[in-house]
Image (cartoon, coloured by chain):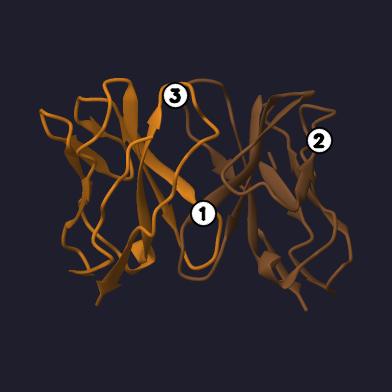
Amino acid sequence: DAKTTQPPSMDCAEGRAANLPCNHSTISGNEYVYWYRQIHSQGPQYIIHGLKNNETNEMASLIITEDRKSSTLILPHATLRDTAVYYCIVRVANNNNDMRFGAGTRLTVKP
Amino acid sequence: NAGVTQTPKFQVLKTGQSMTLQCAQDMNHEYMSWYRQDPGMGLRLIHYSVGAGITDQGEVPNGYNVSRSTTEDFPLRLLSAAPSQTSVYFCASSLQGQTEAFFGQGTRLTVV
C-alpha cells in the first residue's frame, strides 16, 4: 500500500474550516484514499473515502487532486469535539484488512 | 446494535502469563482484524480474518494467535505475555469491498 505523509499537528479556530492535507505520491490506480479519526484513546472512526472524485458526506468533504498524489480533508465548521488525530490511509481495493495507519495529524480546535 | 465489543477494557498481566482478548461483532461482517497501538503511534495490524475458518498474519503477528470459528467472534490470544506487548489493542470489522471499518473501544493491556 502507498505511504502517506501528513503534518504532525494543526490548529483551527472553532467555527472555521479545518483543512487537513495528505500526500500520497506513490498511490496506485486501484488504491482508495480513506480518512479516519481517533478522539482521545477511543477506537478510530471512519470519516470518508474516495477514489478520484471529490466526495462529501455529513461529516466532511474530501478533495483529491487530479493526479491523485494528494488530498485534503475539509471539516467545514470545526467544533471543539473535532479535536482528534486524523489518519489518511490509502489501501488497495477490496483489501479491507490491511490499513496502514501512520502517525496522523493531531488537530486541535481552539475556542 | 452493539457494533464491535471488546472485553476486557483493561488488563494487567505478569510476564509469561497467557490470556485471550475477546472481540465480537453483531453486524454479520466478513472481515475482522486486530491492531495494536503504542503510545504516540498509529495502529499496526496484528492478524486478520476474511471469514470464518480463515485467518492470516498482519504486520506484527509474533507472540499472538487468532482463530475464527464463527462470523461473530475473533479472539486474540497472547501465549506468553512480554512487557513489549504492553499496548492498546483494537478490534475492527467490515463488510467485503470498499466499506468503512468499525472499531471497538479498545483493550488497554499492561504487562509487568
Q: Mark 1 belongs to which amino acid?
A: Leu
Q: Is residue A52 above or below residue A44?
A: above
* First along the sequence among labels 3 and 2: 2
* First along the sequence among labels 1 and 3: 1
Q: Are marks 2 and 1 in contact (CB under 8 Å)?
A: no
Where in the figure is residue B97, as x and y percent of width and height? 49, 20
Chain to which mark 1 belongs:
B
Where in the figure is residue A72, as x and y percent of width and height? 19, 45
Where in the figure is residue A94, as x and y percent of width and height? 48, 21
Where in the figure is residue B7, as x and y percent of width and height? 78, 56
Chain to which mark 2 belongs:
B
Residue that appears at 17% across and 36% down: A69
- Could you tell whether B108 is left or right of A21 in the image? right
- SS at badge 1: strand
Q: Dot 2, crowdedness within 10 Å: few (<14), some or many (≥20)?
A: some
The chain letter of the orange chain reads A
**Quadrant the C terminus of chain B occupies:** bottom right
Q: Dot 3, crowdedness within 10 Å: few (<14), some or many (≥20)?
A: some
> What is the distance, in whole Å, between disc 2 and disc 1 at their CAs?
21 Å
The residue that disc 2 covers is B67
**Quadrant the N terminus of chain B occupies:** top right
The residue that disc 3 covers is B98
Q: Dot 1, crowdedness within 10 Å: few (<14), some or many (≥20)?
A: many
Colour of chain B in the rendered structure image: brown
* Direction left: furthest residue: A66
Give the number of the mark in front: 3 or 2: 2
The residue that disc 1 covers is B43
Q: Mark 2 belongs to which amino acid?
A: Ser
> What is the distance, in whole Å, between disc 1 and disc 3 at their CAs?
20 Å
Examine the image and state in which quarter residue B75 appears: top right
Q: Mark 3 belongs to which amino acid?
A: Gln
